[in-house]
Image (cartoon, helix red, strand yellow):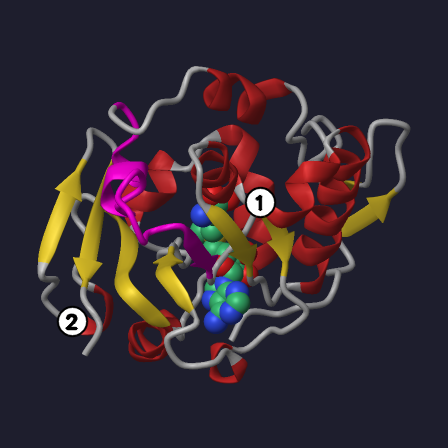
Amino acid sequence: MSSTSLPSDFALEPHPDGLQLRWLSQPKMTPLRIDFLSGKNAFRAAHASIKDEAIARACGLGKPNHSSLLDATAGLARDAFILAWLGAQVALNERHTVVRALLADALQRLYEQHPDWQTRLYLLPIASLAEVATASFDVVYLDPMYPSSDRKVKAAVKKDMQMFHQLVGPDADADDLLAPARRIARQRVVVKRPQHAGFLGGVVPHTQVVSKKHRFDIYFPE
Ligand SMILES: C[S@@+](CC[C@H](N)C(=O)[O-])C[C@H]1O[C@@H](n2cnc3c(N)ncnc32)[C@H](O)[C@@H]1O
């Protein structure tokens, strides 16, 4: 289980552009802030299409009856924002209290400018999949942290994500997510994995969508 408190090496502080996280022992590192209105998220969304985004194809966006989606491991909601932008109604589940605080702040800023987004991308008040009703979302999306002790993963972590990885750490219990996700999903569960990674819980998927950077393993409900 990941730690959910603010480690002593970090500071969470208000900034005119939004709540931000600073890594105190890495003062040169740019503070971490979630921003749906400008920067990388907004740029990617502005250029995104279902055809070009492997994640959207994996989640079945554009098909009838594939609209409500639970991102059960929301993180910085980069993936969730793209999925919402491309038409899904996305509920976010995140257990780390610091990440939740960053998400809540970024969503508030998004809603102030675009009130219609309150139903397109929103944070759930719960933290455990056990509390989510059976068959309550069309799609459940999972992207747990992959062990950062893995050499190839460590090398691939981009600079802007190093702080996030340091804060959250590995999701050692990630394998436990698949069974509840398959109970909750009406249509499919989509698991994002690094190319070389094993299957979540060792369970072979029904099908896959493979992109240059990632693999999306797709499971249908039991
Ligand atoms: C790799 S990040 C997700 C990144 C995300 N897909 C994005 O685009 O920003 C994984 C996140 O899942 C969260 N997480 C892992 N297991 C969880 C669980 N069982 N319940 C809720 N959140 C979980 C972690 O705290 C972490 O923030």
Q: Residues within 10 Å of mark 2 (few under 14, many from 20)?
A: few
Q: Which residue is mark 1?
A: 120
Name the residue type under label 2.
Answer: Gly
Residue contact at pointers 1 and 2, CB within 8 angstroms? no
Q: Residues within 10 Å of mark 1 (few under 14, many from 20)?
A: some
Q: Which residues are magenta?
A: 52-71
Q: Is residue 40 above or below residue 79?
A: above
Q: Is residue 191 above or below residue 4?
A: above
Local secondary structure at mark 1: loop
Q: Nearer the viewer, residue 88 or 148?
A: 88
Q: Which residue is mark 2?
A: 202
Residue 58 lies left or right of residue 49; in this view the side is left
Residue 4 lies left or right of residue 45; in this view the side is right
For the point 13% across and 49% down, the residue is: 208
Residue 52 lies left or right of residue 115; in this view the side is left
For the point 39% across and 22% down, the residue is: 48
Q: Residue furthest bottom?
A: 130
How far across and how far down the image is residue 57, in percent?
24, 38
